[in-house]
């Protein structure tokens, strides 16, 4: 891999704010056995023809011991660091003026606790960029291990061509927290401005699989050095609010389907207006309808001699729990409820033990949070989480007609079903044994109280003892509200709001949903 970041540590410098001691004038080069900043820039030109340098690097980051930087800020408000950058800029322009062309010389001084007294770390190269004072951010780069907790990595500016992301001990220009691939691996982002989506490449190329998911809006990077289920990293490149739009062909708010990109096909990718990944992608595969029934047009065509009767179920009619409705706890302050926390295990089933891959929390202020081993982060709907491969947990916003009672809907990765006999009327509620297996939150462990005592089932918030009755009939299910205080909502087969259910008997079509308490129930034929 080419050297995108030139990196060196200069030692034995008595005064780390002495620009001349860091730079080293040409006349002293013969008497020094250790290269200083000027020598490093001269030995590593940006462009050269034969052995002669034709262009030099002009952006340099100086890393000083953190204690020295802190003392300078406390005593002089950072004046020594500013003087150091200005003096080195002047020396750089004086000694390499004929190799700069139209490039501006820029220096930045930062601190690091890992450096010993008298040490200075210098970084420059193709992937080192320092923005102009008035330059706006074009993209914000963040990474995640579980799709729930995202850590900011670095911004990308309009004139910044390359970004090299890696972990501790590598030669990267930006460090990613929790980098799982080791110091020899790096992630390269190529930016050609706001009109062209960035191109993502992993190095070494043959050691990683890199795919862009347009539905989730992020890249999934997996190591191929390890067996199935090895390390992975998720990468998100979000346009800044100040970034100009890309035009009608590729709006920043909607990520289009990417095309394969290889080094040989890079020019095609740069003009396509689509997110680009260096490695080819697999097909989009079947439609992912998490806990939502497939529409009629998704059913396979009948083969010769077959009819729709081939697909008719032989079992009795069923009711399925397909989603959990998170309430607005601010409506229930008198109960003392502080939060509802729903943990999901690695299979994305509601967890009954302490081991969970991700937890979804709504607090007393009606704020939503995702919690994983990496931490806790506030979230907004709609959002999709993929803490493990192959399965996703999807959160939808509550419809406006339901938003006074509900904060969000959590679509279950795997619905929970129960059979229902036709020709009989049943009831659903806290005191009803019918469909009790679907009331997954009938436990005090999910509800947190201010007094620390968890003795109340979460079902007591929003679900009556006898909420509604239902009876399977030819055209669907007859729904009857049994409690005047019970809120019931009709959602269609795509979980879109249809109507509120009142005291008049209500006909619910097959495949549609009814929301009662925490439960979104699908009534199937």
Image (cartoon, rainbow, N blue to C red):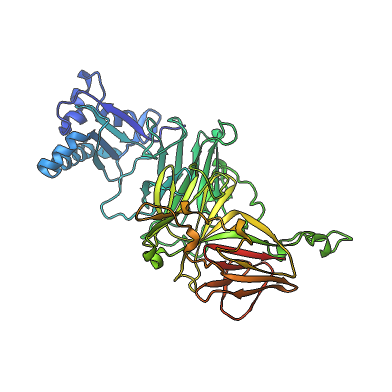
Image quadrant occupied by the C terminus: bottom right
- Report the front residue among 500 and 156: 500
Q: Residue at x 51, y 43 (%)?
A: 353
Taking the image as shown, residue 121 lies to the left or right of residue 420, namely: left
Horizontal and vertical percent for residue 478?
A: 67, 74
Q: Position of residue 226 (x, y in %)?
A: 56, 31
Q: Position of residue 334 (x, y in %)?
A: 37, 65
| Relative horizontal placement of residue 296, taking residue 268 as reference (left or right) | right
Total number of numbered labels? 0
Q: Residue furthest left?
A: 75
Q: Residue at x 54, y 41 (%)?
A: 263
| Nearer to the camera, 433 or 127 | 433
Give the image location of residue 504, x and y in percent: 60, 81
Check the image and name the residue furthest to the bottom. 504
**Eyeballing the image, is 333 above or below 226?**
below
Q: Is residue 106 left or right of residue 345?
A: left
Residue 258 at least partly seen: yes
- Residue 417 or 423: which is nearer the viewer? 423
Going by the image, does 207 lie left or right of 328? right
For the point 14% across and 29% down, which residue is it? Answer: 15
Could you tell me if residue 290 is visible in this image?
no
User: On screen, 207 above or below 255?
Assistant: above
Q: Quadrant of residue 489?
A: bottom right
Quarter of the image holding residue 120? top left
């Amino acid at each position: 891999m080419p050297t995108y970041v030139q990196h060196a540590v200069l030692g034995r410098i008595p005064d780390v704010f002495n620009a001349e001691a860091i730079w080293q004038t040409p006349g002293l080069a013969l008497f020094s056995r250790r290269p200083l900043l000027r020598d490093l820039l001269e030995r590593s030109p940006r462009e050269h023809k034969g052995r002669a340098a034709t262009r030099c690097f002009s952006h340099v980051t100086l890393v000083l011991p953190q204690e020295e930087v802190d003392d300078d800020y406390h005593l002089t408000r950072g004046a020594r660091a500013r003087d150091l950058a200005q003096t080195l800029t002047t020396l750089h322009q004086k000694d390499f003026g004929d190799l700069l062309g139209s490039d501006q010389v820029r220096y930045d001084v930062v601190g690091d606790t890992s450096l010993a007294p008298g040490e200075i770390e210098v970084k420059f190269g193709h992937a080192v960029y320092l923005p102009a004072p008035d330059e706006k951010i074009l993209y914000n780069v963040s990474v995640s291990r579980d799709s729930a907790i995202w850590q900011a990595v670095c911004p990308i500016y309009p004139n910044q061509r390359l970004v090299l992301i890696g972990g501790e001990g590598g030669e990267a220009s930006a460090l990613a927290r929790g980098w799982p691939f080791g110091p020899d691996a790096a992630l390269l982002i190529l930016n050609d401005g706001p009109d062209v989506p960035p191109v993502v490449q992993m190095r070494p190329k043959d050691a990683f699989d890199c795919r862009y998911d347009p539905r989730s809006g992020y890249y999934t990077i997996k190591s191929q050095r390890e067996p199935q289920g090895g390390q992975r990293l998720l990468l998100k490149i979000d346009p800044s609010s100040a970034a100009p739009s890309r035009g009608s062909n590729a709006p920043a708010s909607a990520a289009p389907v990417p095309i394969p990109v290889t080094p040989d096909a890079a020019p095609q990718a740069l003009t396509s207006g689509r997110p680009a990944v260096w490695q080819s992608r697999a097909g989009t595969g079947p439609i992912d309808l998490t806990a939502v029934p497939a529409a009629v047009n998704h059913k396979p065509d009948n083969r010769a001699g077959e009819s729709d009767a081939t697909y008719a179920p032989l079992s009795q009619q069923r009711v399925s729990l397909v989603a959990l409705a998170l309430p607005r706890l601010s409506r229930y302050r008198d109960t003392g409820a502080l939060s509802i926390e729903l943990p999901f295990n690695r299979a994305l089933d509601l967890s009954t033990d302490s081991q969970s891959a991700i937890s979804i929390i709504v607090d007393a202020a009606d704020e939503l949070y995702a919690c994983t081993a990496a931490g806790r982060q506030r979230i907004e709907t709609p959002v999709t989480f993929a803490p493990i491969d192959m399965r996703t947990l999807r959160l939808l916003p509550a419809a406006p007609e339901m938003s006074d009672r509900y904060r969000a809907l959590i679509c279950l990765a795997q619905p929970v079903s129960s059979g229902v006999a036709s020709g009989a009327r049943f009831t659903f509620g806290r005191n009803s044994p019918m469909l009790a297996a679907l009331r997954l939150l009938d436990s005090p462990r999910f509800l947190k109280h201010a007094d620390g005592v968890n003795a109340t089932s979460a079902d007591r918030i929003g679900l009556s003892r006898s909420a509604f009755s239902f009876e399977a009939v030819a055209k669907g299910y007859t729904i009857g509200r049994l409690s005047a205080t019970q809120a019931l909502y009709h959602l269609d087969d795509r979980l879109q709001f249809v109507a509120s259910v009142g005291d008049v008997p209500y006909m619910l079509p097959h495949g549609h949903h009814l929301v009662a308490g925490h439960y979104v129930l699908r009534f199937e034929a």
